[in-house]
């Protein structure tokens, strides 16, 4: 299937590893020209070089901390300079830490939401007028299943993802008349560095091995396994494609059936 993405341009945040790296790979394979963002320049440069070598893709690394307005401004300025226009924005950079009502201090809430709520909103705000002028675009927000399934020990993550699901739907309303389609992907447990860290902590806290902790988590997943970043990236590429022209304001799980809602 030809996704019609050859020569299109995109920004992917958190592209130096995990889900963001896999999305960069999927979009580069479709012939897109990309700007990749993260804080660690070395890892980012290695991903960009890999895309150039593997797909002949134009991929420009931009180092920025997206938890500040300044970082967002830097990214958008550089992206416009390198790419000329922005057809697709993938909001993916997030690093919310666990914690419950009594254990998580205000400073952590602020830091976590500065990236995964404000970072997403600020980037959408920055690219919206550009997409409007260009006649349309796609925004894909990577959220997470805690938004629909609250957990007392992941309060900030659940709240942020619920907010972003709501915001995705509302931005779909705002963007629709301008042919800016806004959707979210809600991954279940995906095997990345972030997931590894979570499992290691869970194992330590419960006195289990990492394999045991993971097996316990997966016991309720219909597929009995975690997902791979490429399984999320495949949906992101579809949502960016011309085939997805009537999908807007949707929040789509990629979780093996883990999320318990209709
Ligand atoms: N893995 C899962 O099971 C899962 C499930 C549901 C939702 N998600 C969501 O999917 C997204 C990606 O998760 P992942 O598992 O791929 O995470 P990951 O492996 O930890 O990768 C996170 C990426 O974000 C970048 N990043 C972190 N802080 C940043 C900042 N302040 N400014 C710019 N970039 C920053 C990291 O690079 P630097 O550190 O170099 O900046 C890295 O490229 C997150 O929003 C996460 O909440 C993941």
Image (spheres, helix red, strand yellow):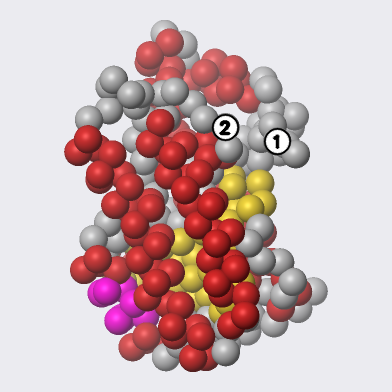
Q: Secondary structure at mark 1?
A: loop
Rendered image quadrant of residue 215: top right
Q: Quadrant of the N terminus?
A: bottom right
208 lies above or below 238:
above
Judging by the rendered image, the residue that carries numbered circle 2 is: 149
Q: Looking at the image, is mark 1 or mark 2 earlier in the sequence?
A: 2
Q: Magenta stretch: give its range.
A: 73-79
Of residues 238 and 143, the one nearer the viewer is 143
Farthest-out residue, right: 1
> Please, what secondary structure does the residue beneath circle 2 have?
loop
Identity of the residue drawn at 45% across and 57% down? 92
Left or right, 236 with respect to 114, comes to: right
Residue 109 within the magenta-colored segment of the rendering = no
The residue indicated by pointer 1 is 261
**For the residue carrying disc 1, how many other residues have a C-alpha within 10 Å: few (<14), some (14-19), or many (20+)?**
few
In this picture, is 140 found above or below 126?
Answer: above
Q: Residue at position x 29%, y 68% from top? A: 72
Q: Residue at x 66, y 35 (%)?
A: 259
Residue 63 drawn above or below residue 191:
below
């Amino acid at each position: 299937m030809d996704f019609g993405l050859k020569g299109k341009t995109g920004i992917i945040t958190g592209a130096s590893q995990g889900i963001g790296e896999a999305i960069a790979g999927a979009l580069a394979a479709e012939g897109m020209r990309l700007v990749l963002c993260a804080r660690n320049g070395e890892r980012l440069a290695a991903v960009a070089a890999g895309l150039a070598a593997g797909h002949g893709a134009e991929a420009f690394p931009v180092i920025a901390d997206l938890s500040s307005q300044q970082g967002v401004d830097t990214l958008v300025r550089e992206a416009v300079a390198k790419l000329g226009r922005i057809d697709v924005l993938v909001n993916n950079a997030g690093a919310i830490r666990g914690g419950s009502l009594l254990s998580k201090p205000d400073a952590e809430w602020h830091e976590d939401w500065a990236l995964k709520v404000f970072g997403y909103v600020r980037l959408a705000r920055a690219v919206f007028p550009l997409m409007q002028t260009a006649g349309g675009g796609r925004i894909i927000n990577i959220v997470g299943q805690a938004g629909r399934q609250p957990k007392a020990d992941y309060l900030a993550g659940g709240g942020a993802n619920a907010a972003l699901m709501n915001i995705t739907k509302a931005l779909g309303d705002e963007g629709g008349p301008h042919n800016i389609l806004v959707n979210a992907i809600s991954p279940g447990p995906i095997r990345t560095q972030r997931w590894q860290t979570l499992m290691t902590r869970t194992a330590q806290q419960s006195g289990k091995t990492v394999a045991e902790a993971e097996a316990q988590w997966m016991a309720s997943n219909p597929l009995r396994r975690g997902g791979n970043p490429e399984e999320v990236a495949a949906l992101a590429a579809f949502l960016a494609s011309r085939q997805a022209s009537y999908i807007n304001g949707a929040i789509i799980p990629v979780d093996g059936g883990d999320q318990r809602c209709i």
